[in-house]
Image (cartoon, grey):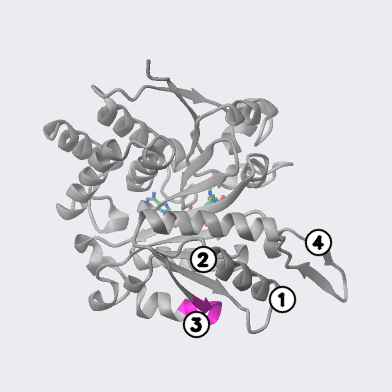
Amino acid sequence: MTSVKKIVVLKGDYIGPEIMTAGLTILDTVTRGTTFAYELIDVPFGGDGIDRAGDPLPQSTIDIAKQADAVLLSAIGGPKWDNALRRPEQGLLEIRSKLNLFANIRPTKIMSAQIDRSPLKPEYVKNTDFVIVRELTSGAYFGKPRKLEANQAIDTMYYSEKEVVRIMHQGFKMAQRRNKHVTIVDKSNVLATSKFWRKIATQIGKIYPDVLIDYYYIDAMTMAILSKPATFDVVITPNLFGDILSDEAAQITGSIGQIPSMSVGESGPNLYEPIHGSAPDIAGQGIANPISMVNTVAMMLTESFDEKKIADKITAAVNYIIENHYVTPDMGGTMTTDEVTQKMVDYIKNHE
Ligand SMILES: NC(=O)c1ccc[n+]([C@@H]2O[C@H](COP(=O)([O-])OP(=O)(O)OC[C@H]3O[C@@H](n4cnc5c(N)ncnc54)[C@H](O)[C@@H]3O)[C@@H](O)[C@H]2O)c1
């Protein structure tokens, strides 16, 4: 008998629930008549957690999430909770750490119909399709000591061997499933942690002889990602550099309203979420772009449930709406969230 997959749903704040509804509608449509069975478990989190349970990450939410097969999160936060004792964003940092999510993976892919929306010239962005694998739980954001005093401030960039080894394996394995090319990003001409990072990358690379490996300093990489984005496949970066690079990469596509991400746990469920925030400026207007959440659902189906064929149907529906310009205003269209979602539903039903 097929096991029923448990998907924890953290529905988010402001546009969060609007796009989560779209994502779940597509999940329902695309899995009908298949053997993929799932149960959705809606638990409080973020601003919704504060409203429903008095905390952005209630203990019950983390307990339930740890038992799940995947966690699906929509964007959280917003001005409503500006003065909260613990803000929604605190819940986000904590859930990543409690689920031990050590790698964040963000794809940057340009379809032909989107090329004109990119801020880069078409000849530069054509065929862009790479993922950034960012170390998420160590490096400059977590190293100690950390101090802010009147006349000095200290941050510490730290990496252990175990932390670098596991992120390298994550990236190399992903490259084996893609175009077998890894780019290592560091600042090994200056930083000790980067010399360490590059040394381990070279050692791990030998375990994957089918994967081509090259190296970029972070400063050169920020330029290369703009001048030749189509030459990359899997980019492995430390936390701080990855934070900056992944936002730069997102801009190449012309709208952040379409990009999914996943954070990978060492054991336990992966967490899937769109890369953007809760967009309070457009919440309630019915114009949030649902593509990010729909792509997030497809990513979950592929990566956590090995249901690539089902995910491919979602990708085909997304390609169809983009190519026919059935899109929301952020992508230059005039449609509402519900209309775009309905177009995808119709497409999936017509191609069963
Ligand atoms: N992972 C998360 O949940 C996450 C990430 C970033 C920011 N936030 C929070 O979100 C709130 C708003 O942050 P912000 O305004 O800086 O960033 P944002 O990503 O919410 O919005 C930036 C711009 O992008 C637009 N946008 C974002 N998603 C869109 C979509 N799906 N469709 C159409 N347009 C979209 C918004 O309208 C806005 O103009 C803050 O409270 C912030 O802390 C949460």
User: On residue 205, which mark appears?
Assistant: 2
N-terminal label among 2 and 4: 4
Nearer-the-camera pick, 250 or 139: 139
Q: Secondary structure at mark 2?
A: helix
Which residue shows up at 54% across the image and 56% down it? 169
| Segment tinted magenta in the rendering | 215-222
Which residue shows up at 60% across the image and 43% down it? 266
Q: CA distance from mark 4 to mark 3?
A: 28 Å
Q: CA distance from mark 2 to mark 1?
A: 20 Å
Q: CA distance from mark 4 to mark 1?
A: 16 Å
User: On residue 144, which mark appears?
Assistant: 4
Q: Residues within 10 Å of mark 4 (few under 14, many from 20)?
A: few
Q: For the residue with label 4, is its CB less than 8 Å from the closest atom of ligand 1?
A: no
Tell me whether circle 3 and circle 2 mark residues in contact (CB < 8 Å). no
Q: For the residue with label 3, is its CB less than 8 Å from the closest atom of ligand 1?
A: no
22 left or right of 234? Answer: left
Q: Residues within 10 Å of mark 1 (few under 14, many from 20)?
A: some
Which residue shows up at 63% across the image and 39% down it? 99
Where does the image place residue 263, in percent across and percent down from the top left?
A: 53, 47
> Callout 1, which amino acid?
Ala
Reading the image, the residue beneath label 3 is 220
Reading the image, the residue beneath label 1 is 192
User: On residue 184, which mark appears?
Assistant: none
